[in-house]
Amino acid sequence: MKTCKHCKKEIEQLASKCPYCQGVQNWYKDPQVTTLLPMLVVFYFIFGSSGLFNKKVYTDYKEQITFEKLSTSSDDSNIIHTYNIKNNTKYKWESISYQYVGTDEKGQVMKVKSEQEYRWVVQPNDSSMLSILIEKNSPIKKWELKIIDMESGRF
Ligand SMILES: [Zn+2]
């Protein structure tokens, strides 16, 4: 025995329709669902192909997203390190999260800056700049960029 999904009365285990309320017990035998299914398939092909339903995960593509340091410049109070991030995937990425790890001359970690740039975007098979501001006169000798995450662009 099982209970009816609709009226909660006890009915036969294999009943597909409740004898009390006529409620359909299996979703695939529900005429409302079976008319909705082809529509869902059509929606999947319209939005699925545009990438709306298949969000990519950065860690699956991290080998294809490389970076190099382009330049170092400074103003009165800051030093600006600029990186060029190259996207060798066919997807758009945005909203980069990264860590900038500073070490002293002995290789000791002195500072870890964790940042997220929500407005950062890189187009498919293109590259994009990332500028990181650090304070002047710090004991840090070396900085290392570690990309933590990015979000896949929707379209
Ligand atoms: Zn029922």
Image (cartoon, grey):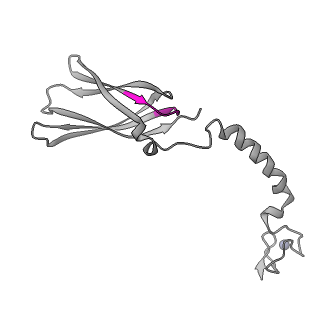
- Pick the quarter of the image with the C terminus: top right
101 or 64, which lies in front? Answer: 64
Residues in magenta, as a range? 85-94
Image coordinates for residue 112, horizontal then vertical, percent? 25, 40
Provide residue 129's location: percent of width, then percent of height.
38, 24
Work out which quarter of the rendered image holds the N terminus and state it: bottom right
- Picture quarter containing residue 69? top left
Say if the magenta span includes residue 26. no
Determine whether, in the image, residue 117 is placed left or right of residue 34. Answer: left
Q: Residue at position x 40%, y 40% from top?
A: 63
Q: In which quadrant of the rendered view does residue 50 lie?
A: top right
Side (left or right) of 66 relative to 16: left
Q: Which residue sits at x=76%, y=79%?
A: 2
Determine whether, in the image, residue 118 is placed left or right of residue 17: left
Query: Could you say which is closer to the camera, residue 32 or residue 129?
Result: 129
Q: Decide: is 104 above or below 127.
A: below
Q: Residue at x 45, y 41 (%)?
A: 61
Magenta span includes 87: yes
Ligand 1 is located in which of the four quadrants?
Answer: bottom right
Residue 137 or 105: which is nearer the viewer?
105
